[in-house]
Image (cartoon, rainbow, N blue to C red):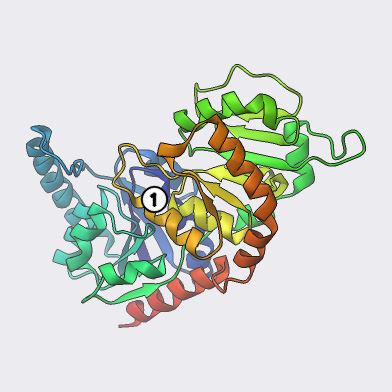
Amino acid sequence: MTRILLTGGGTAGHVMPHIAMLPAYRSAGWDVVYMGSDGIEKDLAQRAGLPFYSIKTGKLRRYFSWQNFLDVGRIVWGTLQAFFILMRLRPRLVFSKGGFVSVPVSVAAWLLRIPVVSHESDLTPGLANRLIKPFCHLIFYAFPETARYLQGKGAVEVGIPVRQELLQGRADEGRRLCGFPEVENGKRKPCLLVMGGSSGAERINQCLAAALPDLIKEFYIIHLCGKGKALNFQHKDYKAFEYVNEGLEHLLALADGVICRAGANSLFELQALAKPMLLIPLEIGSRGDQIDNAKSFAARGWSLVLRETDLDAKSLREGIYQLQAKGQDLSLAMARSPQTQSSSSDKIMEHLKKLMAE
């Protein structure tokens, strides 16, 4: 049986595109296994029913730290672990999604002459993907602008695969989960979904708290606030969740507009759903990847952008009102895009099958 080994981790963003591709792999009859650290990738891979192989890894820092010397040792040890696991499993292909753990796995695969492919979700390649670039047969990427960073290496624009279940949400179920009526006082208020990723976004939460008394008069608001970050605000038209895994598709189906960060996976999920979005890219303490992602979507007419350095309650309210006014145009622009979930998966499978056949 043809075996493919997946790797990548550290954040859900380095794992979920792998999960989205599983139906295509299984439909092709491939045996799929996962190698990573004991981080979030282990939980997500095992929940998806994948055999998981754990290795040690170090953190790839962009600044001087004495821990860098310890991490070099961890990376070397992780490479040795990956080498012997790969020798035993003998996959036909290693597919990396980035993150610290992908470096030792990719190097070990290269030493064993196992083809390595990688996927870059952000517009500007992350450090891990830059390090493994020399070991890759092929690099997939999501944003057209990324091509200029991958010169001299075989690369294909494929977008980002989106989990099929996200496309199957029901607004009525989302309404039930939130306790919102379909009609209130003879009219239907639009619904906003505010989210800051799995851990929330403290700055967005603070500004939303200040703006809520005004916003709640005109909108139903669903707030994914992050674990332990609930606001001291109660209203029948406001529903907060610390984190949502099961049922997220229904909340997305209910939302008329989304306010969120600019992580690449979230952007392409919302684009697949043609959801109008106001992006507040992570800027403070970031390498700037989300700023570039947001600029790309805005340039294509798919989103509005509010810089984090300009964020306060007033600018958030104004951005939301602008989103309401321009939402239909944003949705139409996204709906006209040829990039869909199925085309992304199909493109990836086409190239993987070619590599498998070589």
Relative to 229, is 163 above or below?
Answer: below
Which residue does the image show at 61% across and 33% down from the upper left? 223
Rendering quarter of residue 12: top left
Q: Which residue is mark 1?
A: 291
Which sits in the foreground, 267 or 171?
A: 267
Q: Number of labelled discs?
A: 1
| Quadrant location of the C terminus in the rendered image | bottom left
Residue 349: percent from the left, percent from the top? 45, 73
Which sits in the foreground, 74 or 122?
A: 122
Query: Crowding near pointer 1: few (<14 within 10 Å), some, many (20+)?
Result: many
Amino acid type, callout 1: Ile
User: Is any part of residue 236 visible from this angle?
Assistant: yes
Rendering quarter of residue 140: bottom left
User: Is any part of residue 14 visible from this angle?
Assistant: no
Which residue does the image show at 34% across and 57% down from the upper left? 97
Relative to 42, is 147 above or below?
Answer: below
| Quadrant location of the N terminus in the rendered image | bottom left
Residue 238: percent from the left, percent from the top? 70, 28
310 left or right of 302? left
